[in-house]
Amino acid sequence: MNNINELKKIKSSLPFGVSLLAVSKGHHQESIRNLASHGQVDFGESRLQEAIPKKNALHDLNQLRWHFVGGLQKNKVRGVIKEFNFIHSVDSVPLLERISRISIEEKKIPKIFLQVKFREDPSKGGFLKQDLLDSWSKIILLKNIHVIGLMAIPPKSLDLKQRKDLFCDCRNLANQLNLRDCSMGMSDDWEEAVEGGATWIRLGSLLFGKRQA
Ligand SMILES: *Cc1c(COP(=O)(O)O)cnc(C)c1O
């Protein structure tokens, strides 16, 4: 049961330059097909093993673009590079170096968001801001990766005002690094994210209902 009305309402309210990523993890491929038939092109998955059979079942929809949004383990890098156009969750220099090396082998250039941890959060990965700034000159030399932006997930404990402040911090750091994109905002805080300068909002439950898995 998809919420096509919600999709249309949100899409029409987004400012120019802000895109909607439909995060379909835990939802059936036919739900993806349904949203795709209403014009949705970008879909996010967080597990390679779950994404591959869905992508195979939807291979007739060759307009779709796939975004990896989950924690990326070293041994999944090659598969993710082969299957996904965007990776939203790269959180260390060694992981970036590995992606670069394998992208060269696979003749791919994935679009990458660097996940940044702007507040203390033991449950989430991410670069610390200062570490990212210190590593930046090294990162921009890596081949076959296209770092397009930053990604942030606020800790669950923050209220909406505090989340908006975090989203603004993410926007400011992206600007400082000359990056256009900020992937931020989920079903319960996407409006604050747009106000804070998101260019990609990542919506799951608002479009697909509560997850099955
Ligand atoms: C699941 C997920 C989402 C979507 O979350 P909702 O709250 O259901 O909108 C967005 N981003 C990431 C990284 C996710 O894992």
Image: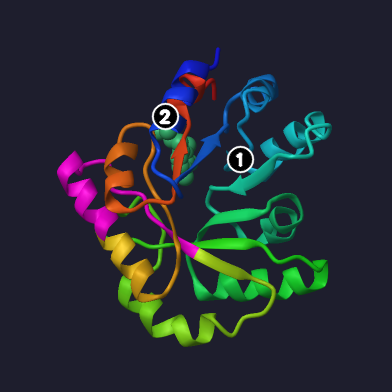
Residue 5 or residue 15, whichever sits in front: 15
- Binning the other alpha carbons within 10 Å of mark 1 as few (below 14), some (14 to 19) or many (20 upward) gives many
* Residue at disc 1, CB closer than 8 Å to ligand 1: no
Establish if 40 lies above or below 3: below
**Residue drawn 61% across the image and 47% down it:** 67
Q: Is residue 120 visible?
A: no
Establish if 37 lies above or below 84: above
Magenta stretch: give its range: 149-168
Q: Is residue 4 left or right of residue 158?
A: right
Provide residue 204's location: percent of width, then percent of height. Answer: 48, 31
Dot 2 and dot 1 residues touching (CB under 8 Å): no
Provide residue 196's location: percent of width, then percent of height. Answer: 28, 51
Provide residue 156's location: percent of width, then percent of height. Answer: 27, 41
Three-letter amino acid code of the residue under disc 1: Asp
Establish if 91 lies above or below 57: below
Three-letter amino acid code of the residue under disc 2: Ile
- Binning the other alpha carbons within 10 Å of mark 2 as few (below 14), some (14 to 19) or many (20 upward) gives some
Name the residue tied to disc 2.
10
Q: Is residue 55 left or right of residue 129?
A: right
* Residue at disc 2, CB closer than 8 Å to ligand 1: no
Provide residue 15's location: percent of width, then percent of height. Answer: 39, 43
**Residue drawn 81% across the image and 68% down it:** 107
Q: Quadrant of ligand 1?
A: top left
Say what secondary structure mark 1 lies in: strand
Snapshot quadrant of residue 53 = top right
Q: Residue furthest front?
A: 16
Q: Using the image, tell me which numbered label, if any, was put on residue 42.
A: 1
Q: Is residue 105 left or right of residue 212?
A: right
How many numbered circles are shown?
2
**Residue drawn 37% across the image and 54% down it:** 152
Q: Is residue 1 left or right of residue 188?
A: right
Q: Is residue 8 visible?
A: yes
